[in-house]
Each structure stands twice: as structure tokens, then as C-alpha cells.
């Protein structure tokens, strides 16, 4: 399911009449590729132009004079409201928030998935269903009480508060991923290990975790993408100074003071998108697996 | 005693997550449901007052616009993404040598934050300097493309950006589905001389019904939760023209200080999600346990 290997041949071998069809196929595919690439291209070229060139030139023209000024401004000077420190502090907020949130939620998902798949006790499936259900709620329905709860816990407007929210609402998906992976491992393995005297934790550490590398990669990528790209929690549970990069980007773009610097906006957008884009380019296969695992395998 | 303890370990390890879900998902839904039945304004009040918040909600023109937008946006977003995704998957399935590269290109928007997507498209569709200015520069002086600032058209601008982001994902789902169809059946059909398009329409696509369903569920879910895209692209404007339930809820909760309205709108959103997801989850779970 998750791989695209072994295509069955649907089109028959090439005959002269089909060469035209082949050309049509390639031009269609090429046109669509342009459609998907165009925004990235426009973002990149706009970020490398000066404001005068943007005003005088065409949207899709290459920059006549390449300048990295907008990138420098976006990173360290652009205003997100009253502060003008650029995206840098918020980028680090996102890192500080995503790394622990991803690690904790992945670890909890692995433990939960291991228990639900391999230590089936009465009610385990009910618990799994309850967790699965939690994946599908629109977060708006927990936004108000979560804001109050974070306040009660003394975590309102802090990065640990955001980490907490991401971990809680990430458990459902991470548990789902690991449970679906561990279910395919024969139960005899646990039985045999138990006969040999291994306990719950030892079986987890020495047998299951070493087998889990692919699903760990899938889960880490999925969680990282979700958390890095999150805006709703970021804008609801943070305050000036603890905002993640997506919120800061939106503030830069929609701040109404001063001249609109489109090149800075575009540079900031690329900076904010770069980490997840990089992950996608490096580990695209696992990214797709996560996407399809969440939807197809249910 | 030791054996008993040993048997309790899995439950004890699972318990914290389970309790957290009970409180933070189910407890919180209950809290929001309760508040939606009170006269809470800036602060929560716990005296029940029936469905007055829902009455206010359904009487509010802004909520009306938000729901209309949701159905319009949702329908277009889902249909166009499905059609485009399926088309791309079928085109890619024709033994293309550069398939891997194309797949990467079609799918990368899904890795981006909706805020990034919204920012990019807001610039591209900027009337003064974006596509409109570009086409006018080519000599078409009367060309107009000002959807982002036109109250009647702005929601379609959101559809464009949404489709750009999600259609590659639908392509990946369908492509995986196409590849999982039994190759023997296809070979047999080819030997019988059945044309390619008939093989698709009569054999391959019908066998992919579950994938259509999952794609629909995921897209519907994305549409209902759409918040960031609208915030970044139009800010819900011009006026309230592109408000969605999610932006309405946020405005009530955090800028209007009307948490009764925020709670009731969130409950309606959950109702819409569950109307779509619950039958699906139910059938999935049944299929697995039977």
C-alpha cells in the first residue's frame, strides 16, 4: 500500500498512433508540474528581488539583480507587531517546541501501541477506539477548556504549555501508527519471550523497539510536520515572545504598519516552510507512508 | 503477587494516556457542551439556560455566511481535489520514466504549513502586482483577477489555494490504490483486447471504492478544520466574506469575548465532523473486529 512499486502495465506497447498520445500525456504532466511549482518559484524569485524591481517587473520574471537583503530582514529585522526581531526567535521557539513534543508523543504512542496490539486485556480495544475517536475531533471543541486548563497549570502562554497540548492531542495518531504496525507482529513472539523469562519492559526494549525503526521514522515525520505547521494551537496558547514560527510569519505578513515588503514576506514564508520541506525531500517515502497510513488503514 | 503485578503493568503504562484522553478530549468536549448551554460571555457561567446560544448562533448573519462558505468551499475543494488527484494518478500510472520526480513535485505542498500556502497565494493573487498585473503587462489591459479582494469571489481564491495544497495528497492515495489492483486481472483484460479506458472505468476504479471513501473523509475533515488557510489568505475578509466556522469560533473565543457563542459554534462544527466521520469509523472498526 505504502509503496508505489511494480506498476501493472495498463497501456499496451507503443504503436505509431500512440506517439501523439504519449506527447499529450507528457505535456499534461508537465503543465501540472508547472502549476505545483509556480508558487514556490514565485516565492523564491520575489524574495530575491528589490522592492523597486517587484513594483516594476512581472510576477514570474527572474530577478535582474539578485539581493539577499529581504532574507536578512526576514530573519532578523522584520516586525511581528511591535517587536522587530525578524523570524529568528520564533523559529527557535518552534524548534524548542517541536523537538520535545515529537519525541514524547512518539514514545507514548510506541508504548501504547505495543500494549494495545500485544498485551490485549479486556477493554483494550475500547480504549483504542476512544483514542482513535480523539484524532477526529475538530480542535475548536477543546480550545476554550484547554486555554483555561493551561492557565490553571501555570503554563498559559509558555512553550511547555504548547508542548503539553501537542503531546496530548498527538497521542491518538501516534498510538494508531504503532498499534497498526505491532498488530502485524505475531503474538507468539511475546509468548516465547515470556517463557524465556523476559518481562513487559524487556520485551519492549529488546524485541519490539529494534523492529520499529520504519514506523518510528514515519511517526516522527508525521508529528514533526503536524507540530511545525500548526497554527491554531500556536495562536491560541502562546503570547508575545513564545509564538511559534507560523504565527510570527502571519504577523509579519499581516502587520499593517509601514510599507508592504513583499520580498520580505516571501523570504519569511520560505524560512518558515523550509524545515518541513527539507524533511519531505530527504524522507519523502516515509512522509507519504504516514499520510496514507493515517487515512487508508484507518 | 508478583505474577499479578506483572499482569497489571501494561494497564498501568497505558493508564496515563487513557486518563489524559478521557480528561482532555471527552471531559473538555463535555465542558464545551455545557458552556454552550449557558449565558457565558467573557467568563464561563455554569447555570444552564437551554439552547439560547444556538438560537443566537443560527440567527447570526455572520454564522450563516460561515456555514454557507463551508459547504461551498467544502464541496468545491473536495470535488476538484478528487478529480485532479485521480487524473494525476492515472496519468502517472502510464509507465512514466520520471514518475518519481513528478510525484515529488505534485505532493510537496502537503508538507507546507497552510500559513505558508496562504501567504504565497495571497501574493500571487495580489491584484496590483500578481497575476492580474502580469497578464495586463502582456497586453490584455482589461484583464481582472481580483478574487482575494472581491467579497463574492474571495472564497474561490481559498478553494484554489486549498486544492493546490491537497490535490497531490489525493494523487498519492489514488496512485497507491491503482498499484494495488491485481495485475493478473488487468493482463487478462488486455489479452481480451479491452481498451485502456474501459479497463480503468470498469475494472480498476470500481475496485478502488474504499480509497474514494478515505480520500473523501480526509478532505472533508481538512475542509471543516480549515482555519489557517483563510487566516493567511484573506483574514476572513473582505468583511466576513470568507469566514468559516473555524474562524468564527476563534473570533468569538479570543477577540469578541463571547465564549457562549464560541462553545456553541464549536459544538456545531463537531456535529458536522461526526456526521461524516462516525459512520466511517464505525464501519472500519466493525470490519476489523468481525
Image (spheres, coloured by chain):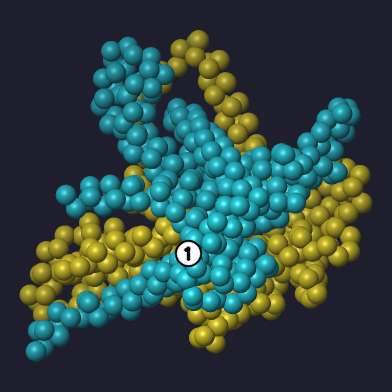
Q: Is residue B178 above or below residue A288?
A: above
Q: Nearer the viewer, residue A292 or A62?
A: A292
Task: State the residue at coordinates (34%, 60%).
Answer: A132
Q: Is residue B62 above or below residue A68?
A: above
**Which element carries disc 1, helix, strand or loop?**
loop
Task: State the residue at coordinates (70%, 62%).
Answer: A250
The chain painted yellow is A
Q: List x then y, in percent, for residue A210.
A: 29, 69
Disc 1 is attached to a residue of which chain?
Answer: B
Q: Dividing the picture into quarters, in which one does residue B194 lie?
A: top left
Q: List x then y, in percent, for residue A278.
A: 57, 58
For mark 1, does the 10 Å Cα neighbourhood hold few (<14), some (14 to 19), or many (20 or more) residues? few
Dot 1 corresponds to which residue?
B50
Is residue A281 visible in the rendered image? The answer is no
Q: Judge left or right: residue B45 versus residue A202.
A: right
Colour chain B is painted in: cyan
Task: State the residue at coordinates (62%, 68%).
Answer: B258
Q: List x then y, in percent, for residue A211.
A: 28, 65
Q: Dividing the picture into quarters, in which one does residue A135 lie?
A: bottom left
Q: Is residue A272 above or below residue B148?
A: below
Is residue B201 visible in the rendered image? The answer is yes
Q: Nearer the viewer, residue B220 or A296?
A: B220
Task: State the residue at coordinates (91%, 44%).
Answer: A56
Amino acid at each position: 500500500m505504502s509503496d508505489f512499486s511494480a506498476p501493472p502495465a495498463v497501456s499496451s506497447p507503443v504503436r505509431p498512433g500512440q506517439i501523439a498520445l504519449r506527447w499529450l500525456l507528457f505535456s499534461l504532466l508537465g503543465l501540472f508540474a508547472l502549476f505545483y511549482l509556480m508558487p514556490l518559484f514565485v516565492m523564491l524569485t520575489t524574495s530575491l528581488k528589490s522592492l523597486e524591481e517587484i513594483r516594476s517587473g512581472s510576477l514570474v520574471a527572474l530577478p535582474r539583480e539578485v539581493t539577499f537583503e529581504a532574507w536578512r530582514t526576514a530573519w532578523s529585522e522584520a516586525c511581528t507587531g511591535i517587536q522587530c526581531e525578524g523570524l529568528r526567535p520564533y523559529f527557535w521557539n518552534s524548534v524548542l517546541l517541536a523537538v520535545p513534543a515529537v519525541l514524547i508523543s512518539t514514545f507514548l504512542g510506541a508504548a501504547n501501541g505495543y500494549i494495545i496490539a500485544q498485551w490485549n486485556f479486556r477493554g483494550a480495544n475500547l480504549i483504542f477506539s476512544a483514542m482513535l475517536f480523539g484524532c477526529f475531533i475538530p480542535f475548536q471543541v477543546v480550545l476554550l477548556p484547554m486555554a483555561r486548563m493551561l492557565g490553571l497549570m501555570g503554563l498559559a502562554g509558555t512553550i511547555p504549555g504548547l508542548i503539553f497540548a501537542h503531546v496530548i492531542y498527538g497521542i491518538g495518531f501516534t498510538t494508531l501508527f504503532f498499534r497498526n504496525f505491532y498488530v502485524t507482529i505475531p503474538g507468539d513472539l511475546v509468548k516465547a519471550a515470556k517463557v524465556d523469562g523476559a518481562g513487559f519492559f524487556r520485551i519492549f526494549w529488546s524485541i519490539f523497539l529494534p523492529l520499529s525503526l520504519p514506523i518510528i521514522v514515519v511517526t516522527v515525520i508525521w508529528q514533526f510536520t503536524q507540530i511545525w505547521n500548526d497554527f491554531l494551537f500556536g495562536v491560541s496558547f502562546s503570547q508575545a515572545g513564545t509564538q511559534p514560527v507560523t504565527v510570527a510569519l502571519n504577523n509579519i505578513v499581516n502587520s499593517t504598519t509601514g510599507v508592504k515588503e513583499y520580498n520580505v514576506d516571501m523570504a519569511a514564508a520560505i524560512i518558515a516552510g523550509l524545515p518541513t520541506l527539507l524533511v519531505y525531500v530527504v524522507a519523502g517515502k516515509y512522509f507519504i507512508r504516514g499520510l496514507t497510513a493515517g487515512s487508508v488503514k484507518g | 503477587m508478583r505474577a499479578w503485578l506483572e499482569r497489571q503493568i501494561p494497564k498501568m503504562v497505558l493508564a496515563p494516556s487513557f486518563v489524559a484522553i478521557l480528561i482532555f478530549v471527552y471531559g473538555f468536549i463535555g465542558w464545551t457542551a455545557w458552556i454552550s448551554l449557558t449565558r457565558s460571555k467573557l467568563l464561563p457561567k455554569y447555570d444552564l439556560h437551554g439552547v439560547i446560544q444556538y438560537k443566537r448562533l443560527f440567527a447570526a448573519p455572520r454564522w450563516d455566511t460561515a456555514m454557507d462558505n463551508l459547504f461551498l468551499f467544502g464541496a468545491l475543494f473536495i470535488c476538484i481535489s478528487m478529480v485532479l488527484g485521480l487524473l494525476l494518478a492515472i496519468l502517472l500510472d502510464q509507465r512514466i520514466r520520471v514518475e518519481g520526480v513528478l510525484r515529488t513535485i505534485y505532493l510537496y505542498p502537503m508538507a507546507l504549513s497552510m500559513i505558508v500556502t496562504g501567504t504565497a497565494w495571497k501574493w500571487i493573487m495580489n491584484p496590483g502586482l500578481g497575476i492580474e498585473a502580469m497578464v495586463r503587462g502582456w497586453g490584455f489591459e482589461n484583464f481582472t483577477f481580483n478574487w482575494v479582494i472581491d467579497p463574492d469571489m474571495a472564497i474561490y481564491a481559498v478553494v484554489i489555494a486549498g486544492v493546490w495544497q491537497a490535490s497531490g495528497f489525493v494523487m498519492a492515495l489514488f496512485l497507491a490504490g491503482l498499484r494495488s489492483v491485481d495485475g493478473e486481472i488487468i493482463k487478462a483484460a488486455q489479452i481480451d483486447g479491452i481498451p485502456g479506458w474501459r479497463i480503468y472505468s470498469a475494472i480498476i476504479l470500481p475496485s478502488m471504492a474504499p480509497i474514494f471513501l478515505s480520500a473523501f473523509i480526509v478532505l472533508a475533515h481538512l475542509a471543516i478544520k480549515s482555519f489557517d488557510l483563510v487566516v493567511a489568505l484573506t483574514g476572513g475578509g473582505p468583511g466576513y466574506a470568507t469566514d468559516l466556522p473555524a474562524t468564527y469560533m476563534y473570533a468569538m473565543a479570543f477577540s469578541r469575548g463571547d465564549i457562549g457563542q464560541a462553545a456553541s459554534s464549536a459544538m456545531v462544527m463537531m456535529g458536522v465532523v461526526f456526521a461524516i466521520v462516525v459512520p466511517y469509523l464505525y464501519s472500519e472498526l466493525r470490519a476489523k473486529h468481525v
